[in-house]
Image (spheres, rainbow, N blue to C red):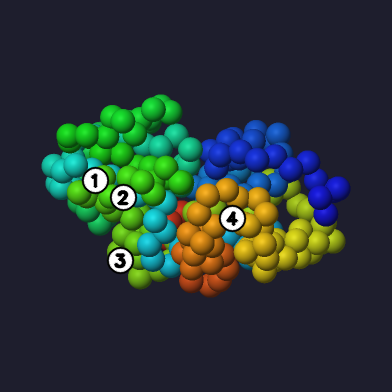
Amino acid sequence: MINQINLQLDTPADCAKKLISGEVDLGLVPVAIIPELKQSHIISDCCIGADGAVETVCLFSEVPLEEIEEVLLDYQSRTSVQLARLLAEKHWKISPTWKQADADFIEHIKGKTAGVVIGDRAFPLRDKFPVVKDLAQEWKDLTGLPFVFACWVSNRPLSAEFVSEFNAALNFGLEHQSEAIHSMASGNHEGLLRYVENVISYKLDDKKLQALKLFHEWLSKSS
């Protein structure tokens, strides 16, 4: 399989840009960009999702939600920032100013300026701010559904043979997470394994498809 593809590793936002522009044919992309594609084909039942807290997609604030005046939005993911906007409108009932953030935005999260932070950078912040809202947990509290952050989407039809082999490769990886972490990752292997095995939910099942449909419906009405 690896000989059939040109594998590129990028942030979620850059993956989205390349798929939309046609620079790549297939990507693990933020689900918020699916409506922007001329053609979209979800080619796998593997995804990046969470059924409850995800730990790495959070709103951080020094003040209670109702006192937040501005929210800095992480530049690395479009789904997470759209989710934060929807939660603010439908769940938290607040209407702050939204600001696209630069690379050093975390140091500006203070006072009445909150921030949406994704990825590993969120871990150390969870003990530094009095208000931490896990966006996946907040979505679950609001809707009763899991949330899908990213899935494998192509911008053109792909052959059945390729899709079958590609999914076999994905599932092989999921079945060998421990080996991959110990051979490729540095740092706290036990913590990483707990996260990938117990926090992230990879199956794009009926409930996640229902959640994805609802998310897109709400996005279309809010835009």
Q: Are marks 2 and 3 in contact (CB under 8 Å)?
A: no
Would you say 16 lies left or right of 44 here?
A: left
Question: The residue tagged with tag 3: helix, strand or loop?
Answer: helix
**Residue at image mark 1:** 129
Badge 1 or badge 3: first in the primary sequence: 1
Local secondary structure at mark 2: helix
Q: Is mark 4 on a helix, strand or loop?
A: strand
Q: How crowded is mark 3: few (under 14 residues within 10 Å), some or many (20 or more)?
A: few
Q: Which of marks 2 and 3 is in front?
A: 2
Residue 126, numbered circle: 2
Alpha carbon separation for disc pair 1 and 4: 30 Å
Q: Please report the residue visible at 63 percent of the width from the left and 57 percent of the height from the top.
A: 182
Tag 1 secondary structure: loop
Left or right position of 113 against 48: left
In primary-sequence order, the first of circles 2 and 3 is 2
- 10 Å crowding of disc 4: few (<14), some (14-19), many (20+): many
Of badges 2 and 4, nearer the viewer stands 2
Distance CA(mark 2)–CA(mark 3) = 19 Å
Query: CB of mark 2 within 8 Å of CB of mark 1?
Result: yes
Read off the residue under disc 4.
151
**Mark 1 against mark 3, which lies toward the viewer?**
1
> What is the spatial separation of the Cα atoms under label 3 and label 4, in whole angstroms?
22 Å
- Circles 1 and 4: CB atoms closer than 8 Å: no
* Residue 7: assigned label: none
**Residue 208 appears left or right of 4:** left
Residue type pointed to by label 2:
Arg
Q: Name the residue under label 3.
A: 141
